[in-house]
């Protein structure tokens, strides 16, 4: 049973977020943090947010391609669904916004929620692999090993184990999804075998859901579409990296770098580390995890050498720029669509049960 508002797991997500924020604020100079926030030039938030929403538009285009084997949909129809899904992720823990997005897609377009969820899972895998590639590329030019060691010390995990735990799951899941899409009949046989001792109704429903999920992975069987999906994943994250890059100017950090190219490389690196670190299905919008990974990345990088308070102010501002505009625009789309997040969440709960 899934309960979006009463579940103990949700309460745990908020508690976890609170603990991480407590750790974030107690490990820096609070007065200096406030001073840094007050002195910042927030005019750079305007182009930053524009870049971010352009990236979301490319996300909608990528999702359009993922859904094309199931149904042809316009960007105009998909863009609000993407925004509302991201809004829900920013307000609900455990990545429940993905469920909300799949249910809202089903409500608007008549597409199976299971199919929608399969395409969203593919999105997340493409995102993670793109970010891992970004980290590998920046490692050629930046001292990555000291940064990973420092992050490992910050969270109390050996840096090699931290690196593996943040990257391996995505590679394993992608390989598993490829196998599902390539061998659907064999998968269905395995499911039937595993559910053979369950009640007939349960086994039938499970088999149907697995079939729909595999159907949602149809894009993986198209060799022409895969390169397009990979290609589209790059500008999505470069647009978000531009948000990180421009907010450097808000805090005067550009004076610490050795040129624009170094700034861009570090912006891409921090974007990748912060988003992979905050991808754990815990707190709403990755609050706490995102701030810690962003702050520590900036503070640990020897070529920057920022104080944790200044880096913390930057992390809070970046995360606010990523969360608040999406929440506001998502609310506008919900109002114009005569629905609400609570209504969607309740509907998700009812249909899941």
Image (cartoon, rainbow, N blue to C red):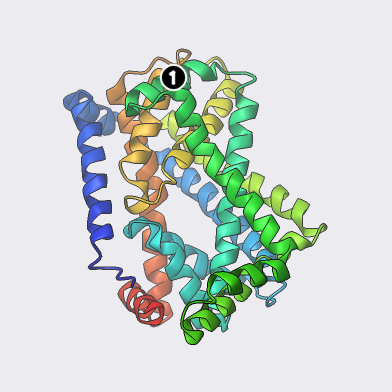
- Residue 251 position within the rendered picture, expressed as x and y whole percent measured from the top left: 37, 28
At horizontal 30% and vertical 74% (from top left) the residue drawn is: 342
For residue 317, say whether it is visible.
no
Q: Is residue 185 left or right of residue 194?
A: right
Q: Across the whole image, how many numbered discs are drawn on residues?
A: 1
- Residue toward you, 22 or 352: 352
Which image quarter holds the N terminus? bottom left
Is any atom of residue 337 visible in this view? yes
Residue at image position (58%, 30%) is: 135
Q: Residue furthest right?
A: 224
Residue 292: x and y in percent read 34, 33
**Relative image position of residue 308 (x, y in whole percent):** 30, 22
Quarter of the image with the C terminus is: bottom left
Q: State the image coordinates of residue 62 (x, y, percent, origin top left).
A: 65, 59
Label 1 element class: helix
Vertical placement of residue 178 versus 306, above or below: below
Q: Residue at x 42, y 26 (%)?
A: 297
Instruction: Name the residue: 41% across, 66% down.
Output: 330
In the rendered structure, the answer to whether residue 174 lies left or right of residue 99 reads right
Residue closer to the observer: 293 or 50: 293
Q: Is residue 282 above or below residue 6?
A: above
Name the residue that disc number 1 marks: 149
Query: Which residue is most to the front?
Result: 197
- Is the residue marked by circle 1 packed among few (<14), some (14-19), or many (20+) residues within 10 Å? some
Quadrant in the picture for residue 20: top left
314 in relation to 149, above or below: below
């Amino acid at each position: 049973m899934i309960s979006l508002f009463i579940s103990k797991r949700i309460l745990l997500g908020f508690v976890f977020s609170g603990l991480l924020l407590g750790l974030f604020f107690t490990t820096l100079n609070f007065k200096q943090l406030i001073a840094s926030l007050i002195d910042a030039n927030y005019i750079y938030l305007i182009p930053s947010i524009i870049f971010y929403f352009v990236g979301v538009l490319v996300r909608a285009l990528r999702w359009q391609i993922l859904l094309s084997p199931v149904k042809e949909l316009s960007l105009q129809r998909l863009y609000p669904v993407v925004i509302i899904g991201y809004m829900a992720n920013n307000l609900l823990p455990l990545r429940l916004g993905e469920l909300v997005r799949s249910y809202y897609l089903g409500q608007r377009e008549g597409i199976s929620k299971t199919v929608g969820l399969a395409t969203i899972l593919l999105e997340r895998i493409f995102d993670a692999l793109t970010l891992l590639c970004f980290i590998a590329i920046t490692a050629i030019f930046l001292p990555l090993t000291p940064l990973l060691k420092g992050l490992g010390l910050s969270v109390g995990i050996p840096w090699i184990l931290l690196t593996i735990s943040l990257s391996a799951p995505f590679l394993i899941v992608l390989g598993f999804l490829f196998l599902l899409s390539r061998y659907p009949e064999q998968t269905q046989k395995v499911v039937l075998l595993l559910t053979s001792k369950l009640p007939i109704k349960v086994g039938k429903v499970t088999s149907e859901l697995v079939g729909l999920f595999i159907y949602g992975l149809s894009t993986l069987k198209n060799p022409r579409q895969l390169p397009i999906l990979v290609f589209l994943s790059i500008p999505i994250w470069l647009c978000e990296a531009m948000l990180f890059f421009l907010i450097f100017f808000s805090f005067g950090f550009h004076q610490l770098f050795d040129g624009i190219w170094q700034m861009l490389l570090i912006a891409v690196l921090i974007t990748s580390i912060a988003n992979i670190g905050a991808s754990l299905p815990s707190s709403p919008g990755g609050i706490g995890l995102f701030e810690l990974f962003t702050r520590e990345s900036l503070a640990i990088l020897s070529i920057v050498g920022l104080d944790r308070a200044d880096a913390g102010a930057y992390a809070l501002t970046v995360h606010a720029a990523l969360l608040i505009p999406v929440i506001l625009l998502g609310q506008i789309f919900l109002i114009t669509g005569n629905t609400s997040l609570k209504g969607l969440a309740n509907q998700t709960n009812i249909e899941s049960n």
